[in-house]
Image (spheres, rainbow, N blue to C red):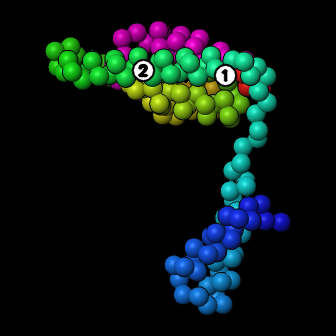
Amino acid sequence: MIPYPLLTVSLIVMWLTLNAFTLGHLLLGTLIAVFAGWALAALRPEKPKIRKWHLLPILAFRVMVDIIRSNAAVALLIVRGKRRPHTAAFITIPLEIEHPVALAAMSVILTSTPGSAWLAYDSRQKTVLIHVLDLVDEEAWVATIKQRYESLLLEIIE
């Protein structure tokens, strides 16, 4: 069975558009398109069970506010330049989240907030390595991430 028939047909058409239309290219393009569809289907994550829908707007509002505040902080850091030195650093944060969709949401939140970036997740130790542009207090960062984002994601996604 072909998991994504429209994708398969599109890939075959693209293959034949980029190459000469021959029987060999049609067969090779079809073979590649079918295997690509199967590979994509294997990457499909399981659907999360959202327990508390009413907390999604709260999480979205928190993220939006933090992105705005972080944009202002990074802009101020750039404007001040070398007058106020800043300390960029890497932080390892222990996480309780295990669901792949919750982890993906957390990575998007942290990376979309200016001044921080999700770098690596260690599933054995359940830790994430992030980069912070201007680190003042490491414990404050850990507490902020765990209290503002992780606690809500743990409640939202089952």
Visible residue check, residue 94: no
Chain-order first, disc 2 or disc 1: 1
Q: Residue 74: horizontal and vertical position, in percent? A: 32, 22
Rendered view: 137 above or below 33: above
- Start-end of magenta stretch: 131-155
Q: Nearer the viewer, residue 23 or 9?
A: 9
The 10 Å Cα crowd at callout 1, few under 14, some 14 to 19, many 20 or more, is some
Q: Residue at x 73, y 25 (%)?
A: 157
Location of the N terminus (image quadrant):
bottom right
Left or right side of 91 for 122: right
Label the magenta part by its dominant secondary structure.
helix
Q: Nearer the viewer, residue 2 or 86?
A: 2
Q: Which mark is residue 68?
A: 2
Q: Residue 8: horizontal and vertical position, in percent? A: 69, 68
Q: Three-letter amino acid code at disc 2?
A: Ile
Visible residue check, residue 151: yes
Which residue, given by chain and number where applicable, does mark 1 sit on? 56
Left or right side of 127 for 137: left
Q: Residue 7: horizontal and vertical position, in percent? A: 67, 64
Rendered view: 137 above or below 78: above
